[in-house]
Image (cartoon, rainbow, N blue to C red):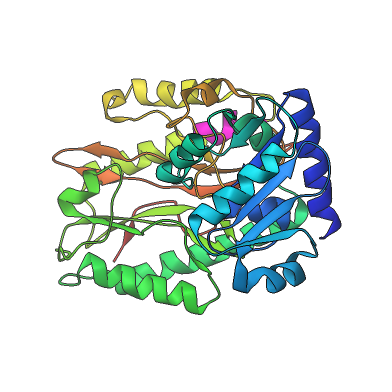
């Protein structure tokens, strides 16, 4: 195990001691990469309050896991019930009547697995791992930032490829296929989420996908993509117009740029997110489009394409102060006006002591005309 992962585990264990948590049960790839340093599907690990981590792996993978991680205590299983028995035995060995075990309770944790764990371990107190892990993962080290920078370069490549492909008669799915192929060929592991190609009436959607809808002349097209490089995400969104955009669409996009500029001008270490949101809403008030805005303009980016601070899912994060070293996506919501369309521009930025620095560089000054 590399020194950096040992240091992360030590900081985690300090948090566990302070919050009286006996063990962290890792069920997600992101936490496994962060603390163990290995990228694999269906990772399972236990990090105790004291001592080295324990890994659980399919029986045929045990030796390879030992080589990849440098950890000796890798316990085999061949079926889910065997994995559960191994975890139960470990927790019983802690010698506590009601051990407190932290588990990530976000997107990556299967609800059925968590429920079965609770049923199999009725005396275990299951708590959310967020207070333990998020304070660590929010601050990106140099090696993490380097990977996010590369993911951001791939995001820029994606927008350029989308510019080349978007045309009347082409389906959204065809655009997504060509763009994903380009970023995968350039070195992306995968996409962090299914790519959005929202055209025409679908540009009004807050979220999206790529469908068999054909792009038509005059459409606004929102392209949102999150390439992943060595486990780390970037997040970018740009608005395209098939032909010259209408004056109203151009003005709406200009307003969105004002919103992003206001957010980034306000985003400084120590400033809570609600103060950033207040600046965005101030920019919207005079426009008459305040009711077209969904709060949550900034969110964290890293091993997750959306991670803390994440106020659209965890409202309490709106109170959290920003910190130097965070990586954030700025532009999380679509500004959608029926009769005009939807516009959005999103960038990945690194928050330094002096303020945000763009990591994604694709053109953002105006709607991209194709």
Q: Nearer the viewer, residue 258 or 109?
A: 109
Measuring from the top left, give residue 175's x and y in whole percent: 29, 70
The reply, left or right, for residue 350 in relation to residue 256 is right
Q: Position of residue 276 (x, y in %)?
A: 53, 26
Q: Residue at x 58, y 38 (%)?
A: 103
Drawn side of residue 314 relative to residue 217, left or right:
right
Indicate whether 18 appears above or below 58.
above
Q: Quadrant location of residue 205?
A: top left
Please report the bounds of the magenta region as a residue range.
Answer: 262-268
Q: Residue visible at 41% across and 56% down?
A: 193
Q: Is residue 43 left or right of residue 292?
A: right
Q: Residue 95: which quarter of the image? A: top right
List x then y, in percent, for residue 370.
28, 66
Q: Residue furthest bottom?
A: 185
Question: Most prominent secondary structure in the magenta stretch?
Answer: helix
In this picture, residue 219 sits left or right of residue 3 = left
Q: Is residue 356 visible?
A: no
**Height in image: 167 above or below 272?**
below
User: Picture coordinates of residue 63 (x, y %)?
Assistant: 71, 73
**Residue at the location (75% across, 64% down)?**
69
Residue sitting nearer the eye, 248 or 328:
328
Q: Is residue 150 magenta?
A: no
Magenta-colored stretch includes residue 263: yes
């Amino acid at each position: 195990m590399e020194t950096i992962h040992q240091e992360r585990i030590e900081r985690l264990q300090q948090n566990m001691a302070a919050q009286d948590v006996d063990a962290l049960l890792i069920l997600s790839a992101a936490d496994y990469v962060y603390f163990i340093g290995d990228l694999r599907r269906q990772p399972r690990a236990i990090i105790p309050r004291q001592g080295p981590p324990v890994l659980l792996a399919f029986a045929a993978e045990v030796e390879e896991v030992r080589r990849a991680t440098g950890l000796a205590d890798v316990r085999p299983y061949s079926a889910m019930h065997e994995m559960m028995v191994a975890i139960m035995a470990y927790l019983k060995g802690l010698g506590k009547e009601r051990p407190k075990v932290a588990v990530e309770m976000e997107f990556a944790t299967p609800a059925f697995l968590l429920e079965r764990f609770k049923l199999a371990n009725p005396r275990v107190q299951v708590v959310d791992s967020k207070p333990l892990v998020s304070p660590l993962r929010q601050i990106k080290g140099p090696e993490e930032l380097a990977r996010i920078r590369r993911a951001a370069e791939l995001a820029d490549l994606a927008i350029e490829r989308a510019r080349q492909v978007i045309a009347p008669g082409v389906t959204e799915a065809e655009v997504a296929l060509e763009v994903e192929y380009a970023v995968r060929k350039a070195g992306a592991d995968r996409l962090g989420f299914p790519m959005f190609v929202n055209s025409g009436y679908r540009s009004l959607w807050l979220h999206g996908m790529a469908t068999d809808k054909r792009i038509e002349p005059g459409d606004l097209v929102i392209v949102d993509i999150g390439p992943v490089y060595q486990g780390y995400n970037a997040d970018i969104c740009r608005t395209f117009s098939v032909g010259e955009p209408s004056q109203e669409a151009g003005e709406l996009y200009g307003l969105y740029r004002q919103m992003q500029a206001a957010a980034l001008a306000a985003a400084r270490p120590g400033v809570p997110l609600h103060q950033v949101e207040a600046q965005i809403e101030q920019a919207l008030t005079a426009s008459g489009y305040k009711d077209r805005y969904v709060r949550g303009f900034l969110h964290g980016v890293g091993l997750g394409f959306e991670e803390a601070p994440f106020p659209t899912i965890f409202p309490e994060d709106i109170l959290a102060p920003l910190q130097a070293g965070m990586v954030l996506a700025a532009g999380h919501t679509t500004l959608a006006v029926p009769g005009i369309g939807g516009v959005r521009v999103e960038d990945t930025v690194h928050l330094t002591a002096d303020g945000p620095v763009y990591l994604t560089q694709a053109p953002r000054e105006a709607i991209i005309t194709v």
